[in-house]
Amino acid sequence: MKNISKFLLPIFTLTIFLFSCTKKENKIYLEGGTAPALSASVTGTIPLSFVNKDNLGLKLMWTNPDYKFTTGLSSQDVSYQIEFDTTGANFTNPQKVIISIGKELSKSFTQSDLNTIFFNQLKLADGIPHNIEIRIKSFLTNNNATLISNVLKFTATPYTIPPKVLPPTNGTLWITGSAVGSGWSNPITGGDEPKQKFTKVSNTIYEIIVTMISGGGYKLIQTQGDWSTQYSFVSGSGNALGGQFEKRDATQFDAPSVSGIYKLTFDFQSGIFTAVKQ
């Protein structure tokens, strides 16, 4: 009996050791969730106008997807992405707009916000109604469990933001001053007149390639012989190679420090000009 006990004792000890080293793994699995239900404050047409740009244009609301794991509802943070695209693109448009949202279950947009999305980002033509689609995606911070909402359809007509500086009334613009061939003559006469006339590239962009003399200055005039409709450099906004300008009969523009041929571009939409050596 004593010999049997000596034989069984090591086996019993080994059994206890192996049992104690065995862990039961409780793996946590995602069981799913419910796609967020998306709704909006308006239906049909989204209101857009520059006059009401600060007013509410659209409020989007959605439900919590309630992600479920084998241990119960998720305690992880849920994040969202709102997607804007044109109808028919099925959210594959390279220019579609994606806006990331934290834990919130709603997002409000002013009419200005929406116009920026449609006109500046989606590149939709202004003054024309466009068919828009919006949806939302939900996902977990540490999980790829993406759920996609229903799609809301709208019509929206983007507006053009008025130019920062009023463009030339008659669509004509000249440069004159000691920085160019004509000197400070106004009207500009002889062969200098066509050389110093800007090309109207668009309703808000004017360009000219002209020889400039360092150390001089210049002004822009809309009407030959009239000094009362000038454009001026905004002091402290830049230098001779670029900056801000405004409609004002005052400060001249300085010529670049190096004489040569320059391309001057005046963008009335942004109120910014540039002078680039050619």
Image (cartoon, rainbow, N blue to C red):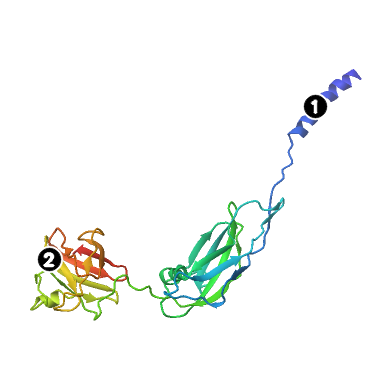
Question: Residue drawn 43% across and 80% down?
Answer: 128
Tell me the amino acid under the disc marked 2: Ala
Question: Residue drawn 87% across and 22% down?
Answer: 5
Question: From mark 1 to mark 2, how far is it between C-alphas?
Answer: 102 Å
Question: Residue drawn 24% across and 59% down?
Answer: 238
Mark 2 sits on what residue? 179
Image quarter where the N terminus lies is top right
Residue 124, x across and y down, in percent: 43, 74
For residue 174, what is the image quadrant?
Answer: bottom left
For residue 209, what is the image quadrant?
Answer: bottom left
Residue 159, x across and y down, in percent: 41, 76
* Of residues 238 and 29, the one drawn nearer to the viewer in this rendering: 238
Q: Secondary structure at mark 1?
A: helix
**Is residue 184 in view from this perspective?**
yes
Q: Is residue 269 above or below residue 80?
A: below
Query: 10 Å neighbourhood of mark 2: few (<14), some, or many (≥20)?
Result: many
Seen as rendered, the residue at the extreme top is 2
Tell me the amino acid under the disc marked 1: Thr
* Of residues 148 and 108, the one drawn nearer to the viewer in this rendering: 108
First in sequence, mark 1 or 2: give its number.
Answer: 1
Is residue 183 toward the left or the right of residue 162 in the image?
left
User: In the drawing, what numbered circle is on residue 13?
Assistant: 1
